[in-house]
């Protein structure tokens, strides 16, 4: 991934152009982050795909978008682990928090409530 792609993804995260998704498998919550279907991001992706050498390995814009979503998801997980430090949730969520901060706290709350148990 080149520096421009990374900068575009950082901008998308900082501009709330990502969509949080929570699913519960019965034991724990699974959180994923995806880029919104935003026209500016779509145009950037098309341009990047056109300029990308074939050796990179993406055969379609959809594959590139999937890769970008994996990078966004990993980046948001890293940001949330840095911001939170611990995995406990206390109090209500203030209204002035960014989407990322709200989602991090939401995940912390549900992680504390339904943390997976280990069987021996």
Image: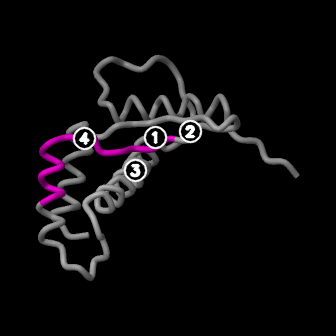
Q: CA distance from mark 2 to mark 4?
A: 31 Å
Mark 1 or mark 3: which comes first in sequence?
A: 3
Q: Are marks 1 and 2 in contact (CB under 8 Å)?
A: yes
Q: Which residues are magenta?
A: 31-46
Task: Give the alpha-carbon distance from disc 2 to disc 3, as whole Å.
Answer: 18 Å
Q: Choose mark 2 or mark 4, whichever is in front.
A: 4
Residue 109 position within the rendered picture, expressed as x and y whole percent measured from the top left: 55, 28
Q: Secondary structure at mark 1?
A: helix
3 is higher (above) or lower (below) than 45: below
Look at the image and say whether residue 34 sits in the magenta stretch. Answer: yes
- Secondary structure under the numbered disc 3 in the rendered image: helix
Circle number at residue 73: 3
Residue 84 image label? 1
Using the numbered discs, state the Cα–Cα distance from disc 1 to disc 2 in whole angstroms. 7 Å
Residue marked by disc 4: 37
Residue in front for this viewpoint, 63 or 40: 63
Viewer-side label of 1, 4: 4
Residue at horizontal 25 percent and vertical 60 percent from the top:
61
Q: Earlier in the sequence, mark 2 or mark 3?
A: 3
Q: Residue 68: which quarter of the image? A: bottom left
**Could you say where residue 56 lies in the image, as x and y percent from the top left?**
28, 77
């Amino acid at each position: 991934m080149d520096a421009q792609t990374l900068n575009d993804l950082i901008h998308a995260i900082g501009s709330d152009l990502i969509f949080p998704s929570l699913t519960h498998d019965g034991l724990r919550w699974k959180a994923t982050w995806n880029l919104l279907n935003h026209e500016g991001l779509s145009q950037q992706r098309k341009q990047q795909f056109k300029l990308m050498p074939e050796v990179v390995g993406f055969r379609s814009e959809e594959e590139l978008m999937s890769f970008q979503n994996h990078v966004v998801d990993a980046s948001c997980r890293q940001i949330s682990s840095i911001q939170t430090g611990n995995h406990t949730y206390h109090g209500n969520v203030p209204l002035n928090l960014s989407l990322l901060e709200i989602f991090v706290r939401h995940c912390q709350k549900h992680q504390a409530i339904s943390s997976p148990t280990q069987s021996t």
